[in-house]
Image (cartoon, rainbow, N blue to C red):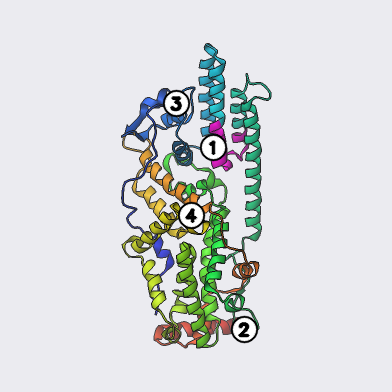
Amino acid sequence: MPQTFVFSSILAPSSSRQGQPSMGECGSGGGGSGSGDLIFQDGRLISGSLEALMEHLVPTVDYYPDRTYIFTFLLSSRVFIHPHDLLARVGQICLEQRQQLEVDPDQAKLKSFSAKIVQLLKEWTEAFPYDFQGEKAMAELKAITHCVTQCEEENSPVKKAITQMMQNLFLSLAARSQLQELWEKLRPPAMDKGPVLKAKPPASQKDILSVCCDPLVLAQQLTHIELERVHSIHPEDLMQILSHRDSLDNHRCRGDQTKTYSLEAYDNWFNCLSMLVATEVCRMGKKKQRTRVVEFFIDVARECFNIGNFNSMMAIISGMNLSPVARLKKTWSKVKTAKFDVLEHHMDPSSNFCNYRTALQGATQRSQMAHSSREKIVIPVFNLFVKDIYFLHKIHTNRLPDGQVNFKKFWEISRQIHDFMMWTQVECPFEKDKKIQSYLLTAPIYSEEALFIASFESEGPENHMEKDSWKTLRTTLLNRA
């Protein structure tokens, strides 16, 4: 018999990850006069003024920023400044440096400086293409590329690199725009799943076991869906979670102005999978059928765990812990619950989900040492991941008492987001089954009310609270009739 718990409880406050952040190395050399405002500890950048951090981003003839710094600063800077405003400041710094180089012209130094600026822009456009969607940002980008190519020949390597960069950027922007248009069309008023059932379907209607009776195959198809959805999530989408709750300097990041359909779709997917599991159990008229479906989903969740698909595993467990399913005592009395007990142990919320975090760490280590694509799969429980970076954001201030940016905090947030993004890039190694995926994505699901009705019809109310609920539901149905 499962213990019912509300999945939203994982968003309750708790201690953040223990241990010191693993910060990327940052050389002591800087990109401008503001580098003196940067504070290093054991060779690692831990704080600095926003202006100094911006100057540290821009290359010089003799300096190029560490790639981990580029990613971390571009990701975290949007908490303080709009991306197009940051791009404008980068352009100003580039212009100032080029003017200094032109005082005593050295073509080799000018070419070296131009190549480094273009490389920085290339990394920026590849990591955060949506920063360049607006007209202001695109105008700033063109102004910078014009500045650094004034003395370049038409077919120079720098100009060719800029042309390729712009082509790739336009392709990325077009792809994301098409994806958002698709989410807008497909986004339902309630849940991202076909029609919502309000009564039991006819016996002729398909159920999950008639579509797929192999737990491993279903777990593999769930992993396909997870990876497809999570692949459309971008680092700045995750940063929006923090900036939405951050009012520092009354700034609003790009994510506040643009709906993050990928986050919404991924969150809906978890809820829909949970409701589908509950629907498949409650729709069965006979106890033997319900027992079989429960045991099937337990095996599916177990296979998800073995694959490293913790998000689908948690969704399945959550579905079986919904009250309409959890209250079916006669059904659960026939279920071999030993496997389910093990799964619930892995997802035990005590000690900040310590057991789950141990399993996730093991999957991460396996992924890092993987020899096959199957071993690379790590799909964390998304709501727990969001909770981790959110509370890391909450327990550490953006700025230190002296007004400097607390860059040590952003190193750790960036590290966690970078790890997540690495997991999303894994190609699913399993063969795609369109029939099974179509069922998982479009099968009708019960509304919450319909789940309770089906549950009470299968096993009548046993206490005063359940009897009152059942009476209220029947009254509601009669009034509608």
How many angstroms separate mark 1 from mark 3 (CA)? 17 Å
Is residue 162 rendered to the left or right of residue 374?
right
Which region shows up in magenta? 119-138
How many angstroms separate mark 4 from mark 1 (CA)? 31 Å
Task: Look at the numbered disc 3 and give the secondary structure of its residue.
Answer: loop
Residue at the location (51% across, 64% down)? Answer: 270
Q: Earlier in the sequence, mark 2 or mark 4?
A: 4
Up the image or down, 74 lies above or below 274; here it is above
Numbered tag placed on residue 371 in the rendering: 4
Identify the amino acid type marked 4. Answer: His
The residue under label 2 is 481
How many angstroms separate mark 4 from mark 3 (CA)? 40 Å
Q: Do the residues under discs 2 and 4 have CB atoms within 8 angstroms?
A: no
Q: Is residue 471 visible?
A: no
Task: Look at the numbered disc 4 and give the secondary structure of its residue.
Answer: loop
How many angstroms separate mark 1 from mark 2 (CA)? 60 Å
Residue count near mark 4 (Cα–Cα under 10 Å), binned few <14, some 14–19, many ≥20: few
Q: Position of residue 203 (x, y in %)?
A: 63, 85
Residue count near mark 3 (Cα–Cα under 10 Å), binned few <14, some 14–19, many ≥20: many
